[in-house]
Image (cartoon, rainbow, N blue to C red):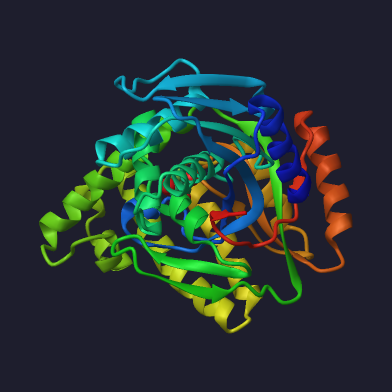
Amino acid sequence: MNDILIQNTTAFFEKSFGSVPQKVVLSPGRINIIGEHIDYNDGYVLPAAIDKIICFAFEKNDSKKSKIIAIDLNEEFEIDLTQEVKLSKVVWTNYIRGVIKQLQDNGFSFEGFNCVFSSNIPVGSGLSSSAALECGMIYGIKELFNLDIQKLDISLLGQKAEHWVGINCGIMDQFSSVHGLENKVIKLDCNTLEYEYHNADFKDYSLILMDSNVKHSLFTSEYNTRRIECEEGLAIIKAEFPEIKSFRDCSEEQVLNLKNKMSEKVFSRVHFVVKEINRVVKACEALDQGNIEVLGQLLFETHYGLSQEYEVSCEELDMLVNTAKDDDAIIGSRLMGGGFGGCTINLIKKGHENDIKSKFSNLYLDTFGIELKFYDVKISNGTTLL
Ligand code: GAF
């Protein structure tokens, strides 16, 4: 599937610019096994890069302007690198403008380039197509102009570009897009940015995403609000327990003891975060021990926390997870990513995949009149040159 994407992208480049691209970059989307809304709360997350990618073709153009073509959107834009970078009404271009701005603001010097890109990462499905776009662009510019930028800095610059566009995201998406390894999940400590790889062996179970095909508009505002609510909660905890530096130092008992010092909302957010950090640690142990049933149970717990305490779910996602909970062939399911739509991640007993797919698509169509999509993702390498 990616071979066709690469062929189409390079052929389109040749047709548009009359030359062979100097660099071709592949930049993946990501899944997250567990640890949701935890990156900006300085806890642990367990993401992985996947085999859905954006393919970029680049060349220098010996000018001070860059021309970028998005094949799938049938749109293009030009940016003058000598002018101050500003936000545009055309949202997709802002991720690229943001990257150029971050590179310039951080002292990296580069000249004009031509770029064509095309993607098979579904947009708005919680698979981080924007992180793949940011990190792939940075990687391409770094390779074209021989810039000295390490992997971690690609992730951090990508994250800053996303902040500039308007989402105050954590580091998970950009980090996993860049640092992914085939068949490995990344246990990332979002406080220290230390990380370790664990084998992604789900034994008798297949990892399948169900795409609700909805994206509720609440996402950006609610996402940024959750950050503020958690900061407020942490400040209350720190005032009471000065030895606590971040949520990971905090026990569930300590949070429960402070319940009457917080609003009900802030308490629910903080209670979820502290439990979710513990779940990541347990999930990693379960994966290492091949105890996939325990991992599955943790996924369900995460979903109910995200839905009831963190309040980032929606009726479509809740329906998918509740149906999964009642099905003996599914041992774990939860909403994945920021929420308010996008995908659920599911652990389905091997051999039952087709039955589950037809049962869920019929039910989902009957209930919401929307087509449910499925992705059998493979855990793959991070951003790379072809
Ligand atoms: C989005 C954000 F971009 C990530 O940083 C992360 O917070 C995620 O939502 C929720 O875990 O993908």
Q: How many marks?
A: 0
Residue 154 lies, with reference to residue 102, above or below; the image says below
Examine the rendered structure and indicate whether residue 378 appears above or below residue 131: below
Q: Residue at x 35, y 61 (%)?
A: 43
Q: Residue furthest bottom?
A: 289
* 5, 88: nearer the viewer: 5
Residue in the image at 89% along x and 56% along y = 355
Residue visible at 40% across and 43% down in the picture: 158
Quarter of the rendering occupied by the C terminus: bottom right
- Tell me: residue 360, above or below residue 327: above
Q: Position of residue 73 (x, y in %)?
A: 65, 24
Q: Is residue 245 left or right of residue 134?
A: left
Left or right: 96 in relation to 367: left
Q: Quadrant of residue 366?
A: top right
Residue 334 lies left or right of residue 359; in this view the side is: left
Q: Position of residue 209 (x, y in %)?
A: 69, 52
Q: Residue at x 77, y 39 (%)?
A: 372
The x, y position of residue 229, in whole percent, is 29, 41
332 left or right of 188 in image: right
Observer-nearest of 147 and 250: 147
Task: Using the rendered image of the protein, determine whether residue 167 is visible from the camera's viewpoint.
Answer: no
Query: Farthest residue toward the top?
Result: 89
Q: Position of residue 83 (x, y in %)?
A: 31, 19
* Residue 88 visible in image: yes
